[in-house]
Image (tube, rainbow, N blue to C red):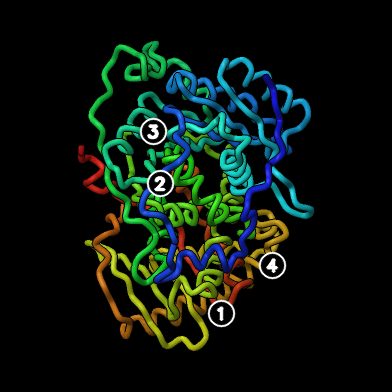
Amino acid sequence: MLTTTPMPSVTPTHVTASEYLAQLAPGAEPGVPQSFDGDASASGVTVLIPTYSPPGGGRTDSLSLCLSTVLATAPAAVLLVVDNGLSTPDARIVGELLRGTGREYRIVAAPRLPGTRYTAAQARNAGLAFLAHPEGAALRRRSLLFLDDDTALAPDSLVRLQAVLDANPRAIAACPRVVPVPDLDSWRRPRPGGQAVPTHGWPGSAGPVPAIGSRRLPGALNGDGYDLLSVTSHGSLITGRTVGLLVRQDPVLWWVRHRGPLFFEGTPYGSTEDMLAMAVLSHLGELWAVPAAEVVDEARKTPGATRAQQFAWGYDHAWLARALAEAGAIGSGVNALVWRGTGWEEQRCGDWGPYAGFLINPAELRLGYRMLRAITAEREVAEAMFSVDADRVRAGTHALGRVVRRWRADADAARRRPRPDLPPLADRDWAGLRDGMDALIGHLAGNVVGSLDHGPFFLYGARQPAVAPPSDRSTP
């Protein structure tokens, strides 16, 4: 059965940026009931996967591999695929893939507003809206798994995630470790010596599932509101990620019906939806990390693609500084996260006039500033790196230089507090696509342009490489 379903109407269908972000402000009352009667959903898992056809070619091959790992891992899974901009030929292939699984499935078409781009947030909200609607009842299950069309489940991952949810009644979500790979196909090929990816421990297989290590994530919200410094500096170690996330379905659908979309669709470049949605989820329960559960994610193919991706993230992080401040979710002043050799220290200066912002690892920022200044000094080099954004990167780099110099002059007077909750700084892997030079330059370029556009608020700094917390090796 092949069905493509327009997104049904769910109330409320839209929230403004201020309404969504106000949920993250100090004292925000989520209005969540003490218990959920739920829908008496069937056991098993609903797998939600957005897919689309990018200009450079379809993603049906990676979606096929993704589905194959779901079929091997979750015999009771049902499939919800969101058409987030499929070409007609790709839509036909996706339908054939889903028919071939033998599982119950639906294809839901994400809405497209005039003048907007397709985003993952928009697609996931469309899938959740369908599940929350009476028409989606047949696909509701006990748990909901978020995947992308270029990701795949490693063996044992789903059973590990579900075991952590079962062992922690207050948990709303269990997050895997996301591992970037060059491409999904090579990940599944036989390994040296003739061994393919092992299948022991899959539900229904003969092998046992090894002990499950897990730890509770601190989350983005505290008594002061949204902790933007820790989230932008340490990412999934604080909040987890949506890719591979396993959630209790009934509470999430309650939120969608009564409070609105889980994912915010209005960030300028359509990124950062993970860090906001995970904060909203924390109103519903605890967030847990399960490092032994792995989801592989296809990395960007070229340094240029990585740089463009990181530019988008860096811009949206800077946009968040203003948006969260205007929503009352973060305070005034200038805050920095400084590495002191043995641990992180948060420093705050309040006397910057109308300016309010965030600096992550000022020592690394000084290095990044020098690199951006050298790149933008030559127009041809800047245009080759940043295309139409070259002039804005140049102007934003000058602004970053002024901020760094003033911070160095004011740092001695800053109020300080240790941040032992953040893991120690590790060496940056300059060889990796996600942590390499292009990633750092791209992210900082996005920061400087976003901060230029949203002054007097600013945010500068990339995600910091971290030593895995000791609790990653714990076993409940």
Q: Secondary structure at mark 2?
A: loop
Q: Which residue is mark 2?
A: 36
N-terminal of the two: label 2 or label 1?
Answer: 2
User: Disc 4 vs disc 2: Cβ atoms closer than 8 Å?
Assistant: no
Q: Amino acid at mark 4?
A: Asp
Q: Which residue is mark 1?
A: 456
Q: Amino acid at mark 2?
A: Phe
Q: Nearer the viewer, mark 3 or mark 4?
A: 3
x 51%, y 33%: residue:
140
* Residue 150 position by quadrant: top right
Task: Tally the marks.
Answer: 4
Residue 202 left/right relative to 63: left
N-terminal of the two: label 1 or label 4?
Answer: 4
Q: Amino acid at mark 3?
A: Glu
Q: Which residue is mark 4?
A: 391
Q: CA distance from mark 2 to mark 1?
A: 43 Å
User: Disc 3 vs disc 4: Cβ atoms closer than 8 Å?
Assistant: no
Q: Position of residue 135 (x, y in %)?
A: 63, 35
N-terminal of the two: label 3 or label 4?
Answer: 3
Q: CA distance from mark 4 to mark 2?
A: 53 Å
Q: Amino acid at mark 1?
A: Pro
Q: Position of residue 450 (x, y in %)?
A: 59, 67
Q: CA distance from mark 1 to mark 4?
A: 20 Å
